[in-house]
Amino acid sequence: MSVTFVVRQLVLRVRQVFTHFDNPWAILWSIATRRQDVVFEVDGLRVRTLNSPAAWGPVLEVFVEDEYAFEWFTGDLRSDAVAVDIGAHVGCFAMAFARRFPGGSVASYEPTPSTGEYTVGNVETNGLAERVTVHRMAVAARTGSFRMADNGPGRAHNGVLYLGQAGSTTIEVAARSFVEVMADAGDTVDLVKLDAEGAEYDILLGTDPGLLAPVRRFVLEFHPSPDHHFGELRTHLESAGLELVRETSLGPDLGLAWFSRDPLDRTA
């Protein structure tokens, strides 16, 4: 990685802080002075996370880069929309959804114990606890326990994808089956977001596609796997009546995919 590239990325991030957040100087001061946490204020929300690029990167993905294409993908959902957020991180997606749909609700799942502290804190600080329910557990094909890598609180790279990597700690957490998650969500689920750092294959391929009958929209981040590939996920979701409407590559066998049960403009 060249010095020029690093400098350009730094300049870009500083520009993004000033153009998208309401407290740019406080953010930069926290980062520069190496405070333990950094708080991002955006559109009336306060998002606290560990002061590390691996922890606040996902905050920028949601509120700066619009990684999940909120406007396009959720613009026509009902005002009391219901969402399921699997892989909640510090709560950015869930809080952005709740802010967009004042009558809506989110069932949010975050398995990393130390990250879950931030998730719960952010939801409560922003007065969203009545509409965003944080479940501090993993989602899997079966209820029980779940082995994953923990690289530290708030860091995005926690999950099965990083098991055995240098510097990571293997932990075991409680897991709830996707069947139970969907049953609790109700008869109509407007949106499922799945970013489980490699566990998406177990969650989806290990569950009957008929389970997804109540789901109107589904967005997922898929990751490299020695045993599976994105095509299997696509086939599984399409067999449930969800059509691929957009796909974005983020690298080899890594990307985002959006599925919809009803027609959606792919070019918007």
Image (spheres, rainbow, N blue to C red):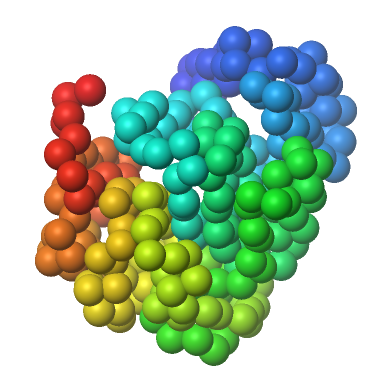
Can residue 14 be seen from the camera position used here? no
Q: Residue furthest bottom?
A: 144
Tell me if 112 is positioned left or right of 70 in this view. Answer: right
Seen at 75% across and 38% down, the residue is 126
Give above or below for 228 relative to 217: below
- Between residue 200 and residue 3, name the one nearer to us: 200
Give above or below for 174 relative to 55: below
* Residue 51 image-quadrant placement: top right
Locate residue 22, reporting x and y percent: 71, 15
Seen at 30% across and 80% down, the residue is 206
- Between residue 191 and residue 253, name the one nearer to us: 191
Can residue 101 be seen from the camera position used here? yes
Locate residue 160, reporting x and y percent: 48, 71
Locate residue 159, reporting x and y percent: 52, 66
Tell me if 217 is positioned left or right of 66 in this view. Answer: left
- Counting every numbered tag in the picture gives 0
Seen at 30% across and 79% down, the residue is 207
Tell me if 127 is positioned left or right of 213 in this view. Answer: right
Locate residue 194, reporting x and y percent: 41, 57
Tell me if 85 is positioned left or right of 90 in this view. Answer: left
* Residue 63 image-quadrant placement: top right
Seen at 20% across and 50% down, the residue is 261
Give above or below for 106 relative to 182: above
- Between residue 129 and residue 139, name the one nearer to us: 129
Q: Split into 4 quadrants, where in the image is the C terminus?
A: top left
Give above or below for 223 relative to 37: below
